[in-house]
Amino acid sequence: MYERTVAKALHARMLEPLGLMQVLTGPRQTGKSTALKQACASVPSPIHSASADLADHLWLRTEWQQARNLASARGEAILIVDEVQKIPSWSSVVKELWDEDRRNDVDLKVFLSGSSSLLLTKGLDESLMGRFELLRSPQWSFSECRDAFGYSLDDFIYFGGYPRSAQFVSDESRWRRFIVDSIVEPTISQDVLAMAPVKKPALMRSLFTLGTQFSAQELSYNKMLGQLQDAGNTVTIAEYLDLLSAAGMLTGLQKFDIRKVSTRKSSPRLMAHDSSLQSALLDLPKEYAMRNTSTWGHLVETTVGAYLLHRGVEEGFQVFWWREGTKEVDFVLRKGEQITAIEVKSGRPKGLAGMKAFLSEYPQAFRMVIGSPETSLERFLSGDVPLFLI
């Protein structure tokens, strides 16, 4: 079975001396439970593993005590709790038990994970600051899907990076139902709507559908309101987009302007966090999508944008886009004082006038054209291209 880098990182931390809690977070259906299972292989310490489905505080205390007993008998132990966010107010109980172990010198390494990255992160922020390290499990990259499932580049652009969906790609209707029923709907109904008060759930769902269908395109907040059936306002739309972004589903990229502290009021360029979300909701067969220059071009740009969003979280850079009049640049990356302008040659007709205009305003920027002879799309998505000047 294919082993992701995050599984190897988890394994290495299981072998380290007791430090901080390890928390594995990421969107649904990205292989977090599998990574934890793989990480446990050949670990000499005794391991107590449990899943918190339909659990409560008493259950968590009982499982924790069993792991403590292992540590007492063997000198050390590892506790793994999956789906911990399903326990109401879980973070306050974890804080209490973790702090007790520190006072009593219990050598118990704790690994937590969950399929709701929103609820997991909320609990960490509320109670556990300074007590944990985060490991992230985003949607899979092209190189991972190529090596694990034999995906071609075109396969990855259309089917995206949710590993369990790979078993359904020979039946596109079944694959599409899996994406919608097992990823989109649970994320919205169980994660996003549980994370914060959402007064208009129907508007949230409609926004996600609209946003993924228009992924890689600019759409003002007012235009979004005009296309949505449920009445709302631009502030509500912006807040809902923030929630969808935190869930690893849909982001509104803001326009780059080095002179502005905040660019929130600009029209966002919508970006799905995985191209499969766009493919599934467009409901177009792969062969048709590939023949349609505009559709395929937007899927290619979504694939690049999702890849940049995932790397940005891991490597600490921001992702924007840029437009001045009719001239635009697909992506602008910023890391400290470093700026990179990226244009994607996706098959849609467009020139490089936007890149020239951007470099005229920001001559210090590093220029990259993906799909050019120097930087092929496949090489870029394989992680072989530096994103900033070194």
Image: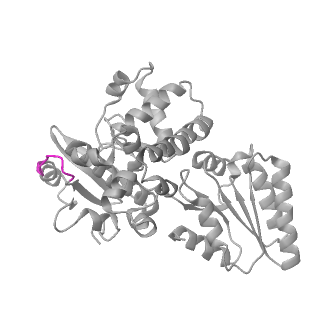
In the rendered view, tell whether residue 31 sits above or below residue 260. Answer: below
Q: Is residue 208 visible?
A: yes
Judged left or right of residue 33, residue 277 is left
SS assignment for the magenta stretch, majority: loop
Q: Is residue 258 visible?
A: no
Residue 380 screen position, x and y as percent: 29, 65
Residue 89 screen position, x and y as percent: 74, 44
In the rendered view, tell whether residue 43 sits above or below residue 321. Answer: below
In depth, the one of 183 and 357 nearer the eye is 183
Residue drawn at the location 47% of the way across and 53% of the way down? 168
Numbered circles on residues, count: 0
Residue at the front extreme, as displayed: 171
Q: Is residue 113 magenta?
A: no
In the rendered view, tell whether residue 227 sits above or below residue 148. Answer: above
* Quarter of image, res 25: bottom right
Q: Quadrant of the N terminus?
A: bottom right
Residue 360 screen position, x and y as percent: 13, 53
Residue 212 screen position, x and y as percent: 38, 39
Residue drawn at the location 84% of the way across and 79% of the way down? 74
Residue drawn at the location 15% of the way across and 38% of the way down? 326
* Quarter of image, res 11: bottom right
Part of the protein shown in magenta: 346-353
In depth, the one of 309 and 324 nearer the eye is 309
